[in-house]
Amino acid sequence: QVQLVESGGGSVQAGGSLRLSCAASVYMPYMGWFRQAPGKEREWVASAYTGGRLAAYADSVKGRFTISRDSAKRTVYLQMNSLKPEDTAMYYCAAGPTRSTLSENLGQGTPVTVSS
């Protein structure tokens, strides 16, 4: 079972930026991010294959967030720019053998708060 440890969350004003990082205990072909806002269901944010290939984004973050990977370090990053209050959520790192199995392995989460 893969262990995932996130870091980089925090508080920022609208329009600001944050960079999330997640280190995996073992290599996984797909890594990505989910988020869950208070009172809402968890939603997929972004994912990428090894080397950052096949990067995909939810429409709500496309053009503002960038996912990248350092496969040698088994690490995935999420650069979040032009943050909006609606981006406020707990962000969870995810990993799996396929994109559809990402949610089977989640980290503990790191909070992101965007104030207006």
Image (spheres, rainbow, N blue to C red):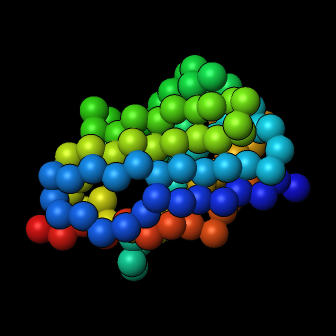
Give how far across and how far down residue 106 sits, in percent. Answer: 67, 59
| Numbered marks: total | 0
Front residue of 37/91: it is 91
Describe residue 42's horizontal placement relative to residue 22 as left or right: left
Quarter holding the N terminus? bottom right
Front residue of 45/81: it is 81
Question: What is the residue that sits farthest to the left in this orientation?
Answer: 116
Question: What is the residue that sits farthest to the right in this orientation?
Answer: 1
Q: Residue at 57% of width from left, 25% of height from top?
A: 52
Q: Residue at 73% of width from left, 30% of height from top?
A: 72
Give how far across and how far down residue 34 sits, in percent. Answer: 52, 55
Describe residue 46's horizontal placement relative to residue 23 as left or right: left
Give how far across and how far down residue 77 sits, in percent. Answer: 52, 42
Front residue of 2/44: it is 2
Describe residue 49's horizontal placement relative to residue 37 as left or right: right
Which quadrant holds residue 88? bottom left
Quarter holding the C terminus? bottom left
User: In this view of the protein, can residue 69 be seen by the observer?
Assistant: yes
Front residue of 69/28: it is 69
